[in-house]
Image: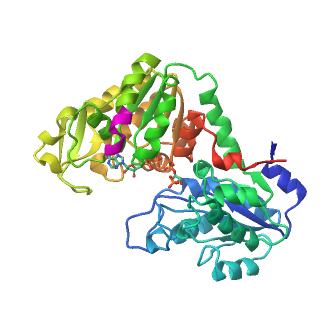
Amino acid sequence: MTLHTLDELLAEGVQGRYILVRSDLNVPLSGAEDGKQTVTDDGRLRASLPVIEKLAAAGARVLVLAHLGRPKGVPEQKYSLKPAVERLAELTEVSVSLADDVSGSAAQAAAAALQDGQVLVLQNVRFDPRETSKGDEERQELAAEFAALGGANAAFVDDAFGAVHRKHASVYDLAKTLPSYQGDLVRTELEVLQKLTENPERPYVVVLGGSKVSDKLAVIANLIGKADKILVGGGMLFTFLAAQGHSVGASLLEADQIDTVREYLAKAAAAGTEFLLPSDVVVAEKFAADAAHELVAADAIESSSFGAEGIGLDIGPETAKSFAEQILAAKTVFWNGPMGVFEFPAFAAGTKAVAQALADSSAFSVVGGGDSAAAVRTLGFAEDSFGHISTGGGASLEFLEGKELPGLDALQRD
Ligand SMILES: Nc1ncnc2c1ncn2[C@@H]1O[C@H](COP(=O)(O)OP(=O)(O)O)[C@@H](O)[C@H]1O
Ligand SMILES: O=C(OP(=O)(O)O)[C@H](O)COP(=O)(O)O
């Protein structure tokens, strides 16, 4: 079994052929009215362009498949790829348009009208419930519809590093349906992440936060024993506090994961990994930019004047200082997930402190994840302040965990 690269595809020749490219265009949007949002961080679009442009320059008819957010299998204006595609078109000289549907008559007509060197992005693949279906046949059926858009001589390039951990139709099944190739973004991301799995210089510190708590809690099991320290902030921290028996008010909580987290805490010490949990938390009256907020001890979240209604939206300054010290003492750092709701300036301080510590440190650092990457850029940090800014958070974590990633697995062929 071999993995074929984009260069091999280009060497075969793509002039006049339909090349389907899975990209990760899942960018953060401004909260403006549905249909009128704008992209607040275009890092993933810029990271996706080189492969799209190489194919277009070589005369391919490029069909891009991508998701945005987590719609529930039906079209929803707020998850339209329109703002992302408009920004993509601004960033390139290549002609880029958006189909009105995923694989239906609009996509078919737009694909048929595509000229050599032009790019058509299909509408959010998650508007079709078959994209994320657990049923193999349903996903395969959608993948066959995607492949049919490209006709007899089509090929597939997976360049969506941020989604390689998803067993979805446009990631996994399509790669098994068409002759498939690995895109340059996926290749370079893997090369950098390999440095973290092959003998990372110690201390090796992993910083975890963000809001995709259930996805990421699963990954922690395999980091125990690999990382020296795991610093827990963001939406993740409340399940840890609850596992220690503390009340967390109305903060983000995965109640069904509390026992699992207890097991992690028990296992960690024996495996030589230390969990560092916050000692203070910023608690808000509601989830809003202008919400009243107070600083409280992490083990007394409900002691704020908001009582059990209070929502933890950032780590406090004492925690930020201690996390920064750990980062500055580390030789290798991997960070996924903002420490708080950094999109609201009142709750961005923890994320900023962690980013600053990474920027100041001489450790080899990787910042991974759509929102984490967006956070460091929107908070004003230069990209070269970090060893590597990865476009994938969950994907990086699952790779570090040593898991087989469906999107990569499916690219292996005879
Ligand atoms: N305490 C918190 N409560 C709710 N959401 C949080 C909290 N801390 C961080 N977040 C949110 O987490 C989101 C990013 O999470 P996630 O998608 O897991 O990260 P990434 O995209 O970097 O992998 C951000 O939009 C941020 O507002
Ligand atoms: O944003 C993404 O992942 P990330 O938040 O882990 O970086 C990817 O686009 C994957 O999205 P998903 O986690 O909804 O499958």
Magenta segment boundaries in residue numbering:
254-261
Main secondary structure of the magenta stretch: helix
Q: Is residue 222 left or right of residue 408?
A: left
Decide which of 64, 216 is in the foreground and name it.
Answer: 216
Decide which of 42, 19 is in the foreground and name it.
Answer: 19
Q: Is residue 14 left or right of residue 393?
A: right
Q: Which residue is found at the position 50% from the left and 74% from the top?
A: 75
52 shown above or below 162? below
3 shown above or below 32? above
Q: Is residue 272 magenta?
A: no
In the figure, residue 402 lies in which quadrant? Answer: top right
Q: Is residue 163 left or right of residue 329?
A: right
Q: Count up the numbered dots.
A: 0
Q: Position of residue 119 (x, y in %)?
A: 70, 70
Q: Quadrant of the N terminus?
A: top right
> Does residue 346 appear anywhere in the picture?
yes
Q: Position of residue 152 (x, y in %)?
A: 84, 70
Q: Position of residue 125 (x, y in %)?
A: 58, 66
> Does residue 272 appear anywhere in the picture?
no
Q: Which residue is found at the position 75% from the left and 72% from the top?
A: 148
Q: Which residue is found at the position 64% from the left and 35% from the top?
A: 192
Q: Is residue 313 left or right of residue 229?
A: left
